Image (spheres, rainbow, N blue to C red):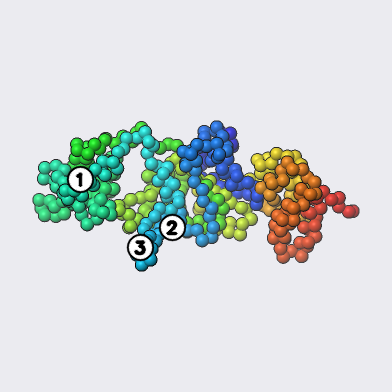
Amino acid sequence: MQLKGSSLLINSKNIILQGAPGTGKTFLAKLMAADIISNGETTDLNNLTEEQQNQIGFVQFHPSYDYTDFVEGLRPTGSGTNVGFELVPGIFKAFCEKAYKPTVNSIDNFEQSWDKFVEEMDEKQEIEVAPGYTYHPSESWEADGGIMRTTDKGYNQYINKSQLYKVYRGLPGVPKRGHDNFRKKVLQFMKDHLELLDFKAAEGVNDKPYIFIIDEINRAEISKVLGELFFSIDPEYRGPKGGVLTQYSNLHDDKDEKFFIPKNVYIIGTMNDIDRSVDIFDFAMRRRFTFIEITAKQSADNMLNNDDTKNLMARLNQVLVDKNKGGLTRDYEIGASYFKPIDGAGASKEIIEPLWDNKLQPLLIDYFRGEHEAEKKIKLIENAYFAIQEED
């Protein structure tokens, strides 16, 4: 690994890059993601293959962002008077499902075999999978591949596609394993007649790193967005042992299905120290993340190449935090993102004046809004920026 933060992320699973405005937190997050995904070969996302880029997810939080956007929720379908609602995975759940999906070198042709099963069932309307075990479509056949048989004792025995797939992979069809022997008879029929291969997961476990970046993580109400994932996001509970029932589990085909964050998923959040919404990031959630402070000086080293630009930025920030001049804390230092557009262009007044007029001065006006000496302080910072010698 080339970046210090990369190894820290691998070890801790969840990190927060925090710092003053413009310190390049999102920039650094993307560098770290590329570094880890490429196994240290590059820090440039553009140098990643398409497959590697698919191992990175990104979202930017905002005050109206919620659980249905992030985990799962109901979304309208159809148009006009024919409108319904469909349960749709949120961006993070979809990302986790992709990260957990077996790699292509695993042996799993269930979908292809199931398509043949569907075709035969639609044609015959019943299939004898074994002597005395004849199944026909249930009322939920179109929705979830539900099939049914009536036992010798006269009760209906129902199984569906998702349950069959779990048994195919060696898992219980339902938590208490009821009817799994009958599901295995259907699977054996698919193997004997529909070319279903034995499932082999050992060779296809997906251990590639998947990195999810949450920009401005503190701008949304974290507990509202994560819901029950508050437990699963803990590094100690990654994988199936940290599985939780979601708020919409009653709408799943399998109501006992649990959602978990795979062990190969890593989370990078970014956070501005002075953002007004920082207080909603409570202490219990803070315990689940490792925090890395990105200072203005570090951002200059990471993002700027020209010494003139670095000196310009340092002069401004020095006065900004001087207790006898700007009087602000280092949380308010201005990062290198503001100066990157002029990096290498020189430090003449013609080059640096537009940056002051259009970006820096308006930001400082916000910083000092309401202070009775605001105008004086901004003038001192302006003089430092333009390297104007102060009068005694």
Q: Horizontally, is 322 left or right of 92 in the view?
A: right
Q: Position of residue 280 (x, y in %)?
A: 55, 58
- Give coordinates of residue 269: x percent, y percent: 54, 48
Q: Is residue 182 visible?
A: yes
Question: In this view, which residue lies farthest toward the left?
Answer: 152
Indicate which label's residue lies in the foreground, 3 or 2.
3
Q: Residue at point 26% right, 35% down?
A: 197
Q: Which mark is residue 68?
A: 2
Q: Secondary structure at mark 1?
A: helix
Q: Mark 3 — residue?
A: 84
State the quadrant of the N terminus.
top right
Report the amino acid beneath label 3.
Gly
Residue found farthest to the right: 392
What residue is rendered at 11% in x and 54% in y?
154
Answer with left or right where residue 58 lies relative to residue 123. right
First reached walking from the N terminus: tag 3 or tag 2: 2
Quick one: label 1 or label 2, which is nearer the N terminus? 2
Which label belongs to residue 226? none
Q: Residue furthest bottom?
A: 81
Q: Callout 1: few (<14), some (14-19), or many (20+) C-alpha neighbours within 10 Å? A: some
Q: Which residue is mark 1?
A: 120
Q: Which residue type carries mark 2?
A: Thr
Front residue of 100 and 6: 100
Taking the spot 40% from the left edge, 37% from the top edge, the residue there is 206
**Circle nearer the viewer, 3 or 1:** 1
At 14% from the left and 55% from the top, the residue drawn is 155
Which numbered disc, 3 or 1, marks the residue that appears first in the sequence? 3
Q: x, y (%) of residue 230?
A: 45, 52
Q: Secondary structure at mark 2?
A: helix
